[in-house]
Each structure stands twice: as structure tokens, then as C-alpha cells.
Image: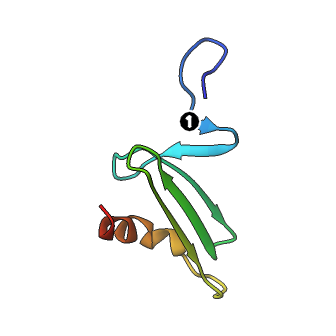
């Protein structure tokens, strides 16, 4: 998303655009029980759903994506 001054922001339509591994990703983490990550430059998406209170599914998204890279 471009800001009014023309620079690029870190959000795209309410989704954070970031990447702890240096790869651009668009992601959403909900309730610590679900993770949905899109890697737009790779044409790849990862969804992790759990039924565990206190789960941390986003810790697995990069590892799962590595299986498909």
C-alpha cells in the first residue's frame, strides 16, 4: 500500500506486510489458534488451524512453506 507521500507502507488493505526471514509475506494471525500467511513473490500460501488454547501456529508457517519451496 502506498502512503500519501508516495512511500510504501507496512500494511496492505489491513494486512501486515512483513517477513522475519527477509522474504516478503502478507499474514494474519488470529487468536493464537490460526495462522494464514501469503508469500506473494513465491505464489505460495500457508494456513495452519489448531484447536488448542494457547497454541502458536505461526511458529510453523515458514517451516511448512519450506516444504513447498
Quadrant where the C terminus sits is bottom left
Residue at 61%, 11% in the rendered image: 5
Q: Residue furthest top?
A: 5
- Side of 30 where 10 appears, left or right: left
Image coordinates of residue 29 in percent, x first then y, are 62, 63
Query: In the rendered image, which quarter is residue 52 located in?
Result: bottom right
User: Along the line of sight, which residue is nearer the eye, 59 or 40?
Assistant: 40
- Side of 24 where 52 appears, left or right: right
Image coordinates of residue 31 in percent, x first then y, are 69, 71
Residue at 38%, 49% in the rendered image: 42
Image coordinates of residue 25 in percent, x first then y, are 47, 48
Residue 48 lies, with reference to residue 52, above or below; the image says above
Residue 12 lies, with reference to residue 38, above or below; the image says above
Residue 55 lies, with reference to residue 68, above or below; the image says below
Residue at 62%, 72% in the rendered image: 34
> How many discs appear?
1
Say which residue label 1 marks: 10
- Side of 43 where 28 appears, left or right: right
Q: Residue furthest front?
A: 43
Residue at 43%, 51% in the rendered image: 43
Query: In the rendered image, which quarter is residue 64 located in?
Result: bottom left
Amino acid at each position: 500500500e502506498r502512503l500519501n507521500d508516495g512511500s510504501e507502507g507496512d500494511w496492505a488493505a489491513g494486512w501486515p506486510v512483513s517477513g522475519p526471514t527477509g522474504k516478503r509475506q502478507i499474514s494474519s494471525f488470529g487468536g493464537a489458534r490460526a495462522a494464514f500467511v501469503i508469500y506473494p513473490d513465491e505464489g505460495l500460501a500457508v494456513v495452519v488451524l489448531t484447536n488448542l488454547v494457547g497454541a502458536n501456529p505461526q511458529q510453523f508457517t515458514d517451516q511448512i512453506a519450506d516444504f513447498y519451496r
